[in-house]
Image (spheres, grey):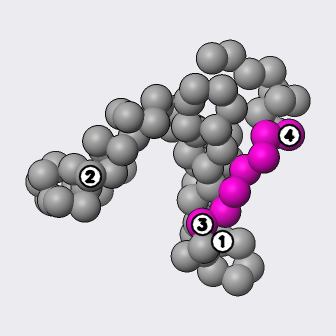
Amino acid sequence: MTMTAGEFMEANWQKSSYSEGNGANCIEVTRPGHTVLLRESEEPTIVLGAPPVRLAALLGAIKEGRLGPARRMM
């Protein structure tokens, strides 16, 4: 799916219910068409997109600890 810059910024992004009151440190999600898009509120131009089935598999693997220990990226 290709979105124009205007469509991207106008998308109906939903904030996580776990976000802090000031809106920092939260994940936002939207679903235009058949793709789920995720972004971090402090870096809104960096977006992860995936079909719902693939995203569910990734989240399941994270919850179950199947991805190994987290590594810090530089």
Q: Amino acid at mark 1?
A: Ala
Q: Which disc number belongs to residue 10?
A: 4
Cα gap from disc 4 to disc 1, whole angstroms: 19 Å
Query: Mark 3 and 4 residues: CB-CB less than 8 Å, in contact?
Result: no
Which residue in the structure is indicated by mark 3? Answer: 16
| Left or right: residue 7 compared with residue 28 | right
Q: Amino acid at mark 3?
A: Ser
Which label's residue is closer to the chain start, 2 or 4? Answer: 4
Which residue in the structure is indicated by mark 1? Answer: 24
In-front residue for pair 62/51: 51
Cα gap from disc 1 to disc 3, whole angstroms: 11 Å
Which label's residue is closer to the chain start, 3 or 4? Answer: 4
Looking at the rendering, the stretch of residues picked out in magenta corresponds to: 10-16
Q: Secondary structure at mark 2?
A: helix
Which label's residue is closer to the chain start, 4 or 1? Answer: 4
Which residue in the structure is indicated by mark 2? Answer: 60
Cα gap from disc 3 to disc 4, whole angstroms: 18 Å
Q: Residues within 10 Å of mark 4 (few under 14, many from 20)?
A: few
Rendered location of residue 47, percent (x, y): 57, 38
